[in-house]
Image (cartoon, rainbow, N blue to C red):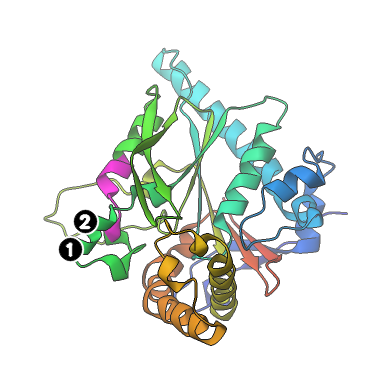
Amino acid sequence: MDAQAVDIEPADLADGELGPYHVFSETDWADLRAGYPMPLSREEIEKLQGFNDRVEFDQVESIYLPVSRLLTYYVSATRGLHTATSRFLGRSDSAVPFIIAVAGSVAVGKTTTAKLLQELIRRWPSRPKVDLVPTDGFLWPNAKLLDEGLMERKGFPESYDVLSLLKFLRDIKAGHRNVSAPVYSHLTYDRVPGKTITIDQPDILIVEGLNVLQTTRLSYDRPRVHFVSDFFDFTIYLDAEEADLERWYLTRFRRLQESRFTDPRSYFHQYAGLGEEEANTFARGLWQRINLKNLRENVGPTKMRADLILHKGPEHRINQVALRKV
């Protein structure tokens, strides 16, 4: 059975959204797996689950395997373009890493999606080297955010060391050896001083973060600069309704309150003892003041820049896939 796609044009989309995309239901998208083998066991998938993001085995088969198959075509096409360009230039340069971005709101499940894709891609017959870098490590340290009055805007574009992130991506694309990225601790809610991860010429790099598709409006008299998204070969946006995102965020906060927050080293340790009503009120305040505001002002508007949009329903299941036409 051939998968059925519905073409959507700008007039069919929500206000401000651009097209066109092919849109698939889960069932129709699953047909595009086309017999692509499942390389992961149920136990392996279980280990890749996020703290508050459950992915059922059947969704890995129906959603993520077709995504993995699609990516094989994109990577192959990019490699072919590299070969053609090298032939034209009369050079034999090594292929540059293929970079995939995973974007979306807080609590939407970016980390789980990125890890699943990493493991699926690693199991391709070519056995590519696949690394994963969260952009949390490029947040400015809390001390700097406090000094500049930005703690209430943590996760907003201005809270990131964008120049360091750009340099990191530039060096990766240039094929440099042993490129370092800072490490972030969700326990201390801060960068880990002196700790880095080293990325050494991967075939594929997955970059996961809130604002990775962000651009900046530049006036004609400002110097030309790169955007983070300029370095990406394929981009994925995880989408969900605001009410669902808020509910997932509150659930995650309560679970963290019962686990990670009980550690005295936790930045949120002081909130571990809050009662359920107090905890919900506090978490909802964080969501509305910071995360929802960031979603509406910065993260959400980048959705239509993505090559692939995965929309989640209330139960964290992806129920719609939109693929940009090429």
Residue 316 is situated, as x and y percent measured from the top left of the image, at: 67, 67
Q: Which mark is residue 294?
A: none
Kindly identify the residue that appears in the image at 47 percent across and 85 percent down: 281
Residue 64 appears in the figure: yes
Residue 30 is situated, as x and y percent measured from the top left of the image, at: 79, 55
Hey, what amino acid is under mark 2?
Answer: Lys
Q: Relative to 129, say whether 220 is above or below.
A: below
Position of residue 208 in the picture relative to residue 227 (left or right):
right
Q: In which quarter of the image is residue 157?
A: bottom left
Foreground: 126 or 118?
118
- Residue underneath mark 1: 148
- Residue 202 located within the stretch drawn in magenta: no
- Residue underneath mark 2: 144
Tell me whether circle 1 and circle 2 mark residues in contact (CB < 8 Å): yes
Q: Could you give the CA–CA distance between mark 1 and mark 2, rounded to whole angstroms? A: 6 Å
Q: Is the magenta stretch mostly helix, strand or loop?
A: helix
Classed neighbour count for the residue bearing mark 2: other residues with Cα under 10 Å, few (<14), some (14–19), many (≥20): few
Magenta part of the chain: 159-166
